Amino acid sequence: MAVDGTQLKTRFSFGDTGQSMQQKKNVIAISGMPGAGKGVAAHAAKQEGLEILVLGDVIREETERRGLEPTPENVGKVMLDVRRTDGLAGVAKRLIPKIDACSGVTIVVEGIRSDDELRELRSHYNVFTFAIHASPQTRFQRLLARGRSDDPKDWATFHERDVRELGVGLGSVVALADAMLINETSITELQASFKTALKKLKLQ
């Protein structure tokens, strides 16, 4: 389902926000529950020539650094531990040097999970948020099919992960996103809708 393009341009435009804003990089932040389709949307942005960074990779890298197997339980515990030790915006803070190292003016960040992470990004960059939404049953089936090592293999683990994600503030990010896409059909349709929405933003 595509987002109304006129509304996108009215609410947010990277290109006409004044000189002080133009000096900052632009970040398109994608949020959504596990399996909603964040990666599909990010891939569509990559096809449009945008650089992609994934917040979850920060946690997976830290899990590997600690010598832990990348199971759903271990990755979840590391995510919570980073937030305890580095603050609620700790994961986003670790991403800042990676964003700064990107050559592009506009960067896509996949996997924003909390208002604290958004505030951290907004203190450095111009930020526009997209939420990708799908039902729990749809998301569960997608995660089973994807089969990544940190994906849940049963409904109980899936539900536990959902609760953990909501516990760090993901629900608020999704509810207050600048735009939302519903992803209950095909990869092709979501990618087409996301590309259409991106073209309605002035990215330079």
Image: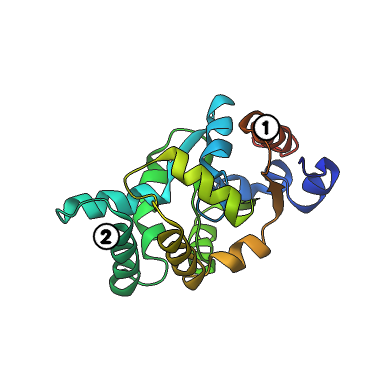
Q: Looking at the image, what colour scheme do you see?
A: rainbow
Q: Amino acid at mark 1?
A: Lys
Label 1: few (<14), some or many (≥20) within 10 Å? some
- Residue at image position (28%, 72%) is 85
Q: Residues within 10 Å of mark 2 (few under 14, many from 20)?
A: some
The answer to which of 170 and 135 lies nearer the viewer is 135
Q: Quadrant of the C terminus?
A: top right
Q: Nearer the viewer, residue 141 or 187?
A: 141
Q: Quadrant of residue 45?
A: top right
Disc 2: which residue? 74
Q: Residue at x 20, y 50 (%)?
A: 64
Locate residue 6 relative to residue 96 in the image: left or right: right
Circles 1 and 2, Cβ within 8 Å, touching? The answer is no
| Residue positioned 58% across, 38% down in the render | 41
x and y, in percent, of residue 70 in the image: 26, 50
Give amino acid for label 2. Answer: Asn
Disc 2, SS: helix
The relative height of residue 120 versus residue 109 in the rendered view (above or below) is: below
Picture coordinates of residue 158, whole percent (x, y): 45, 59
User: Which of marks 2 and 1 precedes in the sequence?
Assistant: 2
Nearer the observer, 78 or 53: 78
For residue 195, which numbered disc appears in the image? Answer: 1
Q: Relative to 76, is 11 above or below? A: above
| Residue 23 visible to the viewer | yes
